[in-house]
């Protein structure tokens, strides 16, 4: 199925008290239970997004649409959007309320497992382990304050790839009207219909930050001042 990623533009302390500890992979962790939890999280992450995205609550129709190859799904999304096929606004708003509640619960549940067992990589949990990046992208941005320190620890210990962490960090920066640090978020110029290079404030600071988490120096960028950082 083509995962529906609702991204506004594509993740300090934990709840109560922030403590990040190294994961001892020799400690017994119920990996089967971890995999089962990930499957449940992925399913619920799409529970109402799928209905909202397709503009229908008809389970059989959704199953048919989800079974299409990815390119056909994209074409169908475009067609339905052009034809104005969508849910009644009151129903859509109600579904979003439910989905956001699920997103909050998923974030807390996932982070508890990450703190105990580490980032859910295929190396740890086996081939076919679902990616949790969409789940983290869908979290509410106020939760990033306590989520990011935990993810950074996973990156620094080599258990999590750095790009998802950097993307979530920069998304939070944009949400707060601050310049990007890692240069992960691009913008679309509606006038020229082109994708603009990421807007950063300080090239040296960006490349130092990227090096700290194992990323290569940024190659394409735009320099922006702090006053105009929001929305760039």
Image (cartoon, rainbow, N blue to C red):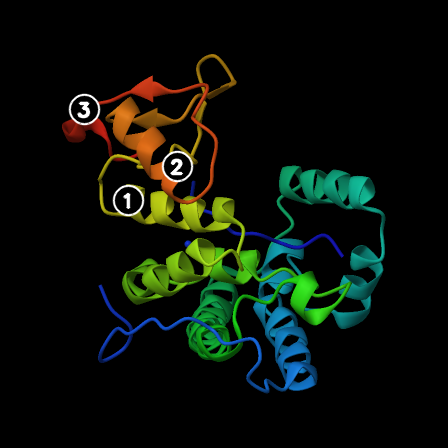
Please indicate, yes or no, whether residue 138 appears anywhere in the rendered image: no
Which mark is drawn over residue 225? 3
Q: Residues within 10 Å of mark 3 (few under 14, many from 20)?
A: few
Viewer-side residue, 34 vs 187: 34
Q: Secondary structure at mark 3?
A: loop
Q: Is residue 60 left or right of residue 39?
A: right
Q: Position of residue 66 (x, y in %)?
A: 78, 58
- Of circles 3 and 2, the one toward us is 2
Marks 3 and 1, how far apart at CA: 14 Å
Residue tagged by mark 1?
173
Image: 207 above or below 43: above
> Quarter of the image containing the C terminus?
top left
Q: Position of residue 56 (x, y in %)?
A: 67, 62
Q: Residue at x 74, y 68 (%)?
A: 126
Marks 3 and 2, how far apart at CA: 20 Å
Which mark is drawn over residue 64? none
> Quarter of the image containing the N terminus?
bottom right
Residue tagged by mark 2?
210
């Amino acid at each position: 199925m083509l995962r529906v990623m609702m991204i506004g533009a594509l993740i300090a302390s934990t709840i109560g008290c922030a403590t990040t500890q190294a994961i001892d992979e020799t400690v017994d962790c119920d990996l089967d239970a971890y995999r089962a939890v990930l499957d449940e999280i992925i399913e619920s992450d799409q529970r109402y997004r799928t209905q909202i995205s397709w503009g229908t609550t008809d389970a059989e129709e959704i199953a048919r649409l989800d079974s299409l190859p990815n390119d056909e799904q994209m074409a169908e999304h475009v067609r339905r959007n052009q034809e104005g096929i969508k849910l009644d606004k009151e129903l859509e708003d109600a579904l979003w309320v439910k989905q956001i509640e699920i997103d909050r619960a998923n974030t807390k549940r996932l982070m508890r497992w990450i703190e105990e067992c580490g980032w859910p990589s295929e190396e740890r949990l086996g081939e076919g382990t679902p990616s949790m990046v969409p789940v983290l992208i869908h979290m509410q941005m106020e939760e990033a304050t306590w989520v990011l320190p935990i993810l950074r620890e996973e990156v620094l210990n080599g258990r999590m790839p750095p790009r998802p962490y950097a993307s979530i960090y920069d998304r939070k920066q944009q949400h707060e009207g601050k310049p990007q640090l890692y240069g992960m978020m691009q913008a679309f110029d509606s006038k020229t219909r082109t994708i603009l290079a990421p807007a950063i404030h300080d090239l040296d600071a960006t490349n130092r930050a990227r090096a700290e988490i194992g990323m290569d120096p940024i190659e394409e960028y735009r320099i922006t001042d702090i006053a105009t950082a929001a929305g760039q």
